[in-house]
Amino acid sequence: MAGKHNLTGPPTSAWIERAEAELRAAGYRSSKPRSSVLEIIGGQNCVLTAHEIGDEMKRKRGRVGIATIYRTLEILDELKLVQKLDVGGSTHYEPALPGGAHHHHHFVCDECGKVSPFEDEGLERAIEKLGKRLKHPVREHDVILRGICKTCA
Amino acid sequence: MAGKHNLTGPPTSAWIERAEAELRAAGYRSSKPRSSVLEIIGGQNCVLTAHEIGDEMKRKRGRVGIATIYRTLEILDELKLVQKLDVGGSTHYEPALPGGAHHHHHFVCDECGKVSPFEDEGLERAIEKLGKRLKHPVREHDVILRGICKTCA
DNA sequence: GTTCCTGCAAAAGATTTGCAGTGAC
DNA sequence: GTCACTGCAAATCTTTTGCAGGAAC
């Protein structure tokens, strides 16, 4: 496995295609607004809030009702196609890779609230080991680090 | 240092006294509602939301306005006397120990939303090592594991 | 007596829901 | 044609804020 991943690179369409396919397979219809949401989410690597997705859509594609965005995100969460993250009073979403592969975590700036991703092998190993020790099976995990980002420092 | 800690044991009044003293030292006045909030927070070891604190207070002491609870929590956060945790759409608070000693993390049930604490040495070590590697200084960290708790399984 | 603190009620922001119309299949 | 999906507006929930009265010092 291993291999390199793009934490900050350009978007990959792999997730979008897979998401489209899984929605179809689960019996959902395809629609323009829904596809737009998929493209925005798949077109970035880290977290966005529902409102940020809406703003992004207004800019790049057509305006879509916020309710539709929330409803789409709910479906994507159900199908485990997105990863939710509660930070700073609102829920953030990011594309989830199959099998939880290539997991990353988040650094949140206490000053400006910006969320940025990072990876760490040692951390993953520690969590994996810990998961085996616990009674309840662990399905997902998030690690959030807080501090002051370079821009705010 | 080391020593044992009570993750699930009875409340300790140490935190309450320290909090009371630090508020005083920072120039805040003492009042009955504020003390009640301190007692509820200090009287448990893991996370509570503002509304849960309000309900608990209604039961054990007098009813206190929700705005007062939020205002008190804001002060406590400023003085680093509580640790905030965003989970399930609302902010949870728990007493913070001095110097970040005896840190614990959280397991969240996907089914019922219950939050329970756990500790892990290996995890702390991995995060500490990681913190040194990163450019920005890390001031705090949370680890959230998700799965199904014993009760819901 | 001055200044801080409190409760209430209104406001603000995030998310959910009801409903009638529109589009996918 | 049927049923899912959409947008809008209303409802709900969490958190913040304005303000007048009361308490701490």
Image (cartoon, coloured by chain):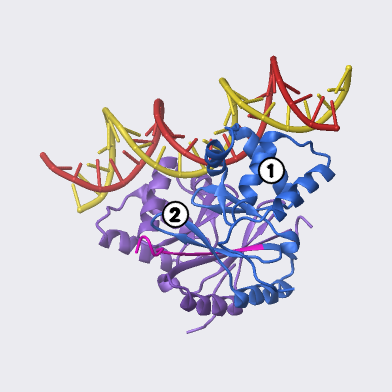
Chain colours: A purple, B blue, C yellow, D red
Task: Report helix, strand or loop for mark 2.
Answer: loop
User: The magenta stretch spans which residues?
Assistant: B141-153
Q: Is residue A27 depicted above or below B65 in this figure?
A: below
The quadrant the C terminus of chain B occupies is bottom left
Task: Report helix, strand or loop for mark 1.
Answer: helix
Disc 1 is attached to a residue of which chain? B
Separation of marks 2 and 1 at Cα, in angstroms = 24 Å
Badge 1: few (under 14), some or many (20 or more) residues near its Cα, within 10 Å? some
Disc 2 is attached to a residue of which chain? B
The part of the image, by quadrant, that contains residue B122 is: bottom right
Q: Tell me which amino acid carries mark 2.
A: Gly
Q: Nearer the viewer, residue D13 or A60?
A: D13
Q: Nearer the viewer, residue A102 or B111?
A: B111
Do callouts 2 and 1 point to residues on the same chain? yes
Q: Nearer the viewer, residue B105 or D6?
A: B105
Nearer-N-terminus badge (2/1): 1
The quadrant the N terminus of chain B occupies is bottom right
Badge 2: few (under 14), some or many (20 or more) residues near its Cα, within 10 Å? some
Q: Which residue is mark 2?
A: B113
Residue B74: numbered disc: 1
| Relative image position of residue A21 (x, y in whole percent) | 31, 64
| Relative image position of residue B72 (x, y in whole percent) | 68, 40
